[in-house]
Image (cartoon, helix red, strand yellow):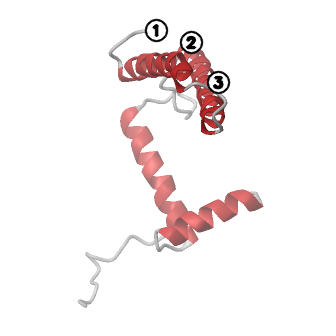
Amino acid sequence: MGRMNQESAPAARDARLTVRFSSEEMNRVRRAARARGLPVSGYVRGAACEVADTTTSRESTTGTGLVKPALSPEQVAVIDAARVDHKRLSVNLNQFMRLAHRGQVDLGKLAPVVVELNLRTEWLVDVLSGRRSL
């Protein structure tokens, strides 16, 4: 392994940040760091820098240092309503499948739920991808 010289050495890390986590949050961070083979400090530093680089390169700030939201409040409301509908339909589908596995329902009765779930999923994907407007 080659020696590091001043040109290849990483920049000195002379700034310090103290962050508080709940026990659950800290466990999640530790697991994620361990899964990537990193110390917790390196994982947190890397994640923070990645988000900071992505945010500053794609979005402008409001002048207060806060990043402007990418979606309008109306778009967020529509997406949230679609999420709730999608979840309800998915729960219905799951309930039908449980009954079907017990032989208590005809699988043909699932068709309307599957069709509706598919239509709403396609609509949401179209909206999020910009192929369809709200």
Residue annotated with mark 3: 88
Q: Which residue in the rendered view is the most extreme toward the right?
A: 23
Residue 72 in picture, x, y percent from top left: 53, 16
Q: Position of residue 63 (x, y in %)?
A: 53, 28
Q: Give the class, few, some or many, for how many residues have Cα within 10 Å of label 1's Cα (few <14, many ≥20).
A: few
Query: Going 61% across and 27% down the picture, which residue do you hit?
Result: 87
Asked whether 32 or 68 is in front, the reply is 32
Amino acid under disc 1: Leu
Relative side of 130 to 5, left or right: right
Of the numbered discs 1 and 2, the one sitting upstream in the chain is 2
Residue 16: name its quadrant: bottom right
The numbered mark, 2 or 3, whose residue comes first in the sequence reads: 2
According to the picture, the residue beneath numbered tag 1 turns out to be 134
Q: Residue at x 56, y 15 (%)?
A: 78
Which amino acid is tagged 3?
Answer: Arg
**Mark before the other along the chain sequence, 1 or 3:** 3
- For the residues labelled 2 and 3, say whether their Cβ atoms are less than 8 Å apart: no
Q: Reply above or below: 75 against 37.
A: above
Query: Which residue is most to the front?
Result: 103
Q: Contact, CB < 8 Å: mark 1 with mark 2?
A: yes
Q: Nearer the viewer, mark 1 or mark 2?
A: 1
What is the x, y in percent for residue 58?
38, 34
Query: What residue would you read off at disc 2?
Result: 74
Task: Evaluate whether residue 19 shows in this view.
Answer: no
